[in-house]
Amino acid sequence: MPKASGKLRVGFPYVGDRFGGSNMSSLVMAGGLQERGIEPVIMTHGPGQAADEAAARGFSVHRLPPLSSAPGYSRPDGFRIEHLKAAPTCRRFINELGLDLVHTNDLTMLRTWALPTKLAGARLIAHWRTSSKSSLSVSAALMIAERIVSVSTYSKQILPAWAQRKTVVEFNALEVFWTEVHRSEARLTVRQRLGIPADAILIGVFGNLTRRKRAHALADVLHGLGTVISGRQVFGMVCGGVVEPRDDLLEAKRVQMRLEDRLLMPGFVRPVEEWMGACDVILAPAEREPLARNVLEAMAIGVPVIVSSDGGLREFVVSGENGFLLDPNDTSAWIEGSRKVLIDSSLAASFVANGQTATGELTVPKHAERIERIYRTALGR
């Protein structure tokens, strides 16, 4: 593929059959960069949701061989010999596609693409979207990176000091900012799909159903709130796919607390903003959360949020002003916080207004402009 004159060409590699909020943030960023005249080149190792989501956003997708025959989330997130074996193929793609930079967005792609990027003479940008400490293989890859982009200061501080010195903090960009009209339509549409009353209270949790995300906390909240508040029936909704290590407590509590009819599990949903907009409040009770794109999305479309204090969201959510910031393990606080938001309409309205103001700076064009500046610096331009 010949390179367009004067344009930066940036490769975005993904594991084909693994997809989450970080990957979506990366694709959103790639779209913003494209609007600025940069050429994003989307590459996926094997087929799957990453390729499908990229294609749905109008990108052409270059298919690389899968890294493993084992299905997506059953593969351990650590160094494997497959990362090194893929190096010749990755290097060939960098050269054939004329890539100036490779921008990785998860640890698997960082481990896989760091060495071939260096061998091909391109520059590596590593997006740090994790709460995991860097292993030997990750540290070696980060040494190769020209720049590291962290989604929060919380996540940046996990890095060793030498890596922090070349790290820039950039919150994820958001595409959708809603009005009350949009939310009213979504509330009606989603409740009809779920088969619950049009005036029912709906509390949402969004994200992959892995142990660290603690979606099971919604069961505790529903159980503590009871079945009716202010004459309205109370329902909960967990949206996301199962990821290992899975949150086994979710189903166990759902059965134990007899919440099968009130704690609904529609799975992976799209468009996610419609399902979020239908909620009266969204909870994010995760531990060690680097940032949580779903919370920023909820704030942008005008839904009150209650979030964990264990992670990067404490840099964005001011407790009592644009949401509640709570200890993820303080069950009573989550129950009472939810009750306050659901009963006090003026409090909920203030959370919405302040949340939309706070997220107003996270637009895609502004984010893409700052990322391009990082690219230019990395290339010495």
Image: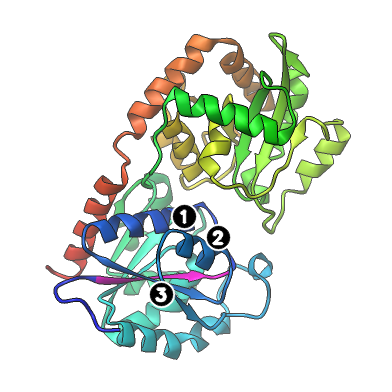
Q: Which mark is residue 19?
A: 2
| First in sequence: mark 3 vs mark 2 | 2
Give residue 260's position: percent from left, percent from top.
83, 35
Query: Answer yes or no: do the residues labelled 2 and 1 have beta carbons within 8 Å?
Result: yes
Query: What's the residue at 38%, 85% (across, down)?
Result: 93
Q: Dot 3 corresponds to which residue?
A: 140
Image quarter of the N terminus: bottom left
Q: Which mark is residue 24?
A: 1
Distance between mark 2 and mark 1 Cα atoms: 8 Å
| First in sequence: mark 2 vs mark 1 | 2
Give residue 318's position: percent from left, percent from top.
41, 26
Look at the image and say whether residue 13 sits in the magenta stretch: yes
Q: Which residues are magenta?
A: 9-16
Q: Is residue 103 above or below residue 87?
A: above
Amino acid marked by disc 1: Met
Look at the image and say whether residue 192 sits in the magenta stretch: no
Query: Is residue 97 visible in this depiction of the protein?
Result: yes
Give residue 177's position: percent from left, percent from top.
39, 34
Query: What's the residue at 46%, 39% (across, down)?
Result: 297
Query: Is residue 304 visible in this depiction of the protein?
Result: no
Report helix, strand or loop for mark 2: loop
Amino acid marked by disc 2: Phe
